[in-house]
Amino acid sequence: MTVHVACFDMSGPADASGLTAALNAHPSATRAVVFAKTEGHYGPNDFSRDLARAALHGALEAAELARNSMVMLAIGCEGVSTPSGYVLIETPDTEAMCAPEHSALVIGTAVSSPPLPEDIGTPALVDCVTATVHAALADAHLLPEEAALILVKGPVLPPRHPLANANRSNGSRGRAIAALGVGVALGEVPRASVTMESIATDLTLYTKRAMTFAGPELDRVEVVAFGNRMGACGHLRICASLTRDILDVASIKHMLLAAGLKLDEVGELAEPKRIKAIFAKCGVAPDGVLRGGRTTVYTSSLAPEMHMRAAESGVLGSVFGTTRYFISGDPIQQSTPGGGVAAVIYQI
């Protein structure tokens, strides 16, 4: 299969017209994977996720792709982020850009069975994530060492659930569980080190190739695996890198240069139109200190993730010259403390 990518804007959480237009442009599509960022405040009375999921699934159903497709949502467009989404569309291979020695982007997806509510927030869910990551890699025909980036969204219990508690309803812990599951699957984290006590606390345990999310609207684990595979067809590739902190533009630029993209004499992208999708997970160290300075990320009335997304939107905007990106905060156990992850899908 050949992968295509399109970006679409959303006028509100219930607007899937841009996705519909992108799907209509590929009538031979066999599968679509949608990543969407829409405005919302993440409070218990915020139903933007529900609106967006219903609208995007409706567009996939209208295109007769819902059965084989996946939607991964993240809320929050603080800063200078445009509410928007990416859709990765698979179509049957053509002879264009196909050769045994040619490397191109491939994607794999997998969805778990619903875990027991009492397993959410525990190492049992880590094992569920690990198994689902293996399934997504198999779907993409990738070995663990060939994976460039794994995106995982896992469930947390809504506070109103009768079995909800501090472990089962905590979004940060849910993201940590998803990250540890990826780390175990890729051989980066020893399974024996994952315990109830180490989840979200032992930050020496982390994966280097994941971005994870957690939400109460899910009842299962969803995984998307990305990689560049020899013999695959298409005009796209992916590159990814860890970042040292939320201001680390240098690591992003080194990643771009290593991928063959060029910067001009002042460090700006020479061919910005080759960038087709931008993903980032950003954070601030648990003590709130950034490059020696105190910040109010953890001490203001705003949720820390809102600070992170707003700050990173400016960083990415300055590098890529756009306001369209898939940003999420709290890269817990997805990088070193205070670090993050960045990835780009680009045209060969």
Image (cartoon, helix red, strand yellow):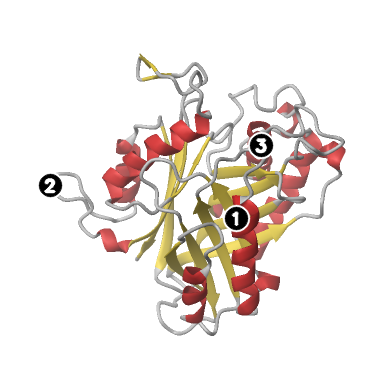
- Mark 3–mark 2 CB contact (< 8 Å): no
For label 1, count other residues whose C-alpha is less than 10 Å away and answer few (under 14), some (14-19) or many (20+): some
* Residue 242 pos. (x, y %): 44, 38
Q: Say what amino acid the circle numbered 1 marks.
A: Met
Q: Specify the quadrant that holds the N terminus.
A: bottom right
Identity, as a three-letter code, of the amino acid under mark 3: Leu
Q: Which mark is residue 265?
A: 2
The disc label shown at residue 136, or none: none
Q: Name the residue tied to disc 1.
A: 72
The C terminus, quarter of image: bottom left
Residue nearest the observer in this picture, 139 or 53: 53
Please say if 58 is above or below 203: below
Whether label 3 touches label 1, CB < 8 Å? no
Q: Tag 1's secondary structure?
A: strand
Name the residue at 48% across, 22% down: 285
Residue 144 visible in this rendered orientation of the protein: no
Identify whether 130 is placed above or below 159. below
Q: In the drawing, what numbered circle is on residue 180?
A: 3
Q: Amino acid at mark 2?
A: Glu
**Comparing labels 2 and 1, the label whose residue is closer to the camera:** 1
SS class of the residue under badge 2?
loop
Q: Position of residue 202 (x, y in %)?
A: 64, 22
Q: Position of residue 232 (x, y in %)?
A: 50, 71
Disc 2: CA contacts within 10 A as few (<14), some (14-19) or many (>=20): few
Query: Is residue 45 shown to the viewer in this render?
Result: yes
How many numbered callouts? 3
Give the side of residue 301 with respect to residue 273, left or right.
right
